[in-house]
Amino acid sequence: MSEKQVEQLYGVLNESAAFLQKNEELSYIDSLIQTINLIQDEDYDGYEQLSEIKSNLDLSKFSSEDIRKAIQMAILTAIRIDNIQPTYQLTPDTIGDIIAYLISVIYQNTEKLSILDPALGTANLIETVYYQLKQANPKMQIDLSGIENDDAMFELAAQSLEIQKLSSDLVHEDYIQDVVIPKVDVVVSDLPVGYYPIDENVTNFETKANTGHSYVHHLLIEKSMDNLKDGGFGFFLVPSQLFQTTEAKGLLKWMQGNVYLQGMLNLPAEIFKNKKSQKSILILQKNGNGINQADPIMLGEFPSFKKQDDFKKFLDEISAWEKHELKLIK
């Protein structure tokens, strides 16, 4: 991936989005969505300045990964300029790389893999996972799907995937409601944390709260694991304090008989503002296909990303655990 190429494309995206923001009185994020759309519109006949920018841009010179990185930079600019709420924050590439590594070991001999992100956001996580898996196994066919309720994030994810020429099945709905999609092999998601506001939508969930609103991340975990094929894996970015709340009792009760808790890996504390905001990668496996509980469960905390030797050693330990304690998919 060329840093120069990424910066060049980001410059085009930023210039066009800033122009539209000013002349159309739009937010930066909406201007960015329009920019990505017009770049792909061969028949664009609008502002002369944007037509000139577009005519000087040859997308064939950029790799799909270059395009993803440039869009990522533009989204970060949008978050800063628009003062966007935390739900728009991007999942860091390093975390996506780790999740992809975990998946690649388990599915190392797999020719075809289907992956769902039920809280798609801007699609950066699922895109990062896709590219890392393809790098590990170029011949693997990967089918992507995603669900997103927020209008702007859905449009941005759809445009981002389209401009990268990544085929995907996207649904613009509230996943907690009656969204029916085909079962998949793997679920990956940086789960939103908080309360789900519509109590009548969760009456059939085992993880719902006894009184008041239910935790949306609990509901998403339950629904996502139900959307997996037997033996499939869920990799969720969750609060490290997930099992230390009073509401965790319902989540733990549901897990018994439905899924196996195969691992929980704390991310380095240094990348979070404080201990309360620290997150972990939760590894769940759906029952079926002769699946058993790993013994031992993989528990631990990643070393600092800055300590490359320690970090690599920890990844090697995880790889050894996966190969010896989990049923690898052939």
Image (tube, rainbow, N blue to C red):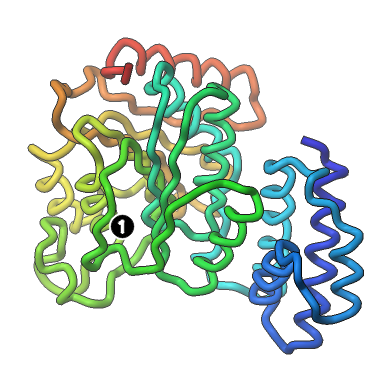
48, 199: nearer the viewer? 48
240, 260: nearer the viewer? 260
> Where is residue 329, by image quadrant?
top left
Vertically, is 320 above or below 64? above
Structural crowding at the residue carrying mark 1, measured as other residues with C-alpha within 10 Å and reported as few (<14), some (14–19) or many (≥20): many
> Where is residue 11, by image quadrant?
bottom right
* Residue lying at 36% horizontally and 55% vertically, measured from the top left: 118
Q: Where is residue 107 in the image (x, y as percent from the top left)?
A: 39, 23
Image quadrant holding the C terminus, namely: top left
Image quadrant holding the N terminus, namely: top right
Q: Name the residue under label 1.
A: 217
* Residue lying at 22% horizontally and 17% vertically, measured from the top left: 295
Q: In this view, does 321 lie to the left or right of 69?
A: left
The reply to whether residue 80 is visible in this rendering is no
110, 290: nearer the viewer? 110
* Residue lying at 23% horizontally and 21% vertically, measured from the top left: 294
Q: Position of residue 36 (x, y in %)?
A: 70, 64
Q: Where is residue 65 in the image (x, y as percent from the top left)?
A: 68, 41
* Amino acid of disc 1: His
Q: In this view, does 83 lie to the left or right of 229?
A: right
